[in-house]
Image (cartoon, rainbow, N blue to C red):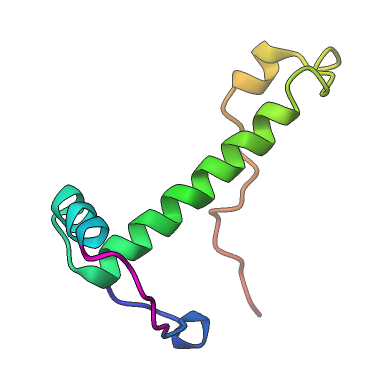
Amino acid sequence: MVFSDMAAVRKITAILPSDLLEAAQNATGAGVTETLRQGLESLKRREFGRMMLELRGKVDFTGFDLDELREDKDYGWDQPTSEK
């Protein structure tokens, strides 16, 4: 994996049980860095899912027209702007 913004990358030292790291690497088929990255991403997604579940039943969607929301809209954003 190539990081486009090196300022957003941190180098760390982690002390991990060898068997845990080996099992994780076997599961991902990747090296140490990529395995740790995938594990952290998985935790991040799980936390987001937990937060979404907490919102269940708390958001009122009665004012929305689902048929209108499903329609494709053209806002003209992909049109090049003409500069003079």
The quadrant of the picture occupied by the N terminus is: bottom left
Q: How many marks?
A: 0
Relative to 43, say whether 64 is above or below. above
Residue 50: x and y in percent read 62, 35
Relative to residue 77, is residue 57 drawn left or right?
right
Q: Main SS of the magenta segment?
A: loop
The quadrant of the picture occupied by the C terminus is: bottom right
Relative to residue 6, is residue 53 drawn left or right?
right
Relative to 2, say whether 30 is above or below. above
Q: Residue at x 67, y 22 (%)?
A: 69
Asked if the magenta segment contains residue 17, the reply would be yes
Q: Residue at x 23, y 70 (%)?
A: 32
Residue 70: x and y in percent read 60, 20
Residue 15: x and y in percent read 36, 75
Q: Nearer the viewer, residue 49 or 32?
A: 32
Q: Residue at x 56, y 27 (%)?
A: 72
Relative to 58, say whether 32 is above or below. below
Q: Nearer the viewer, residue 74 or 18?
A: 18
Magenta region: which residues? 12-18
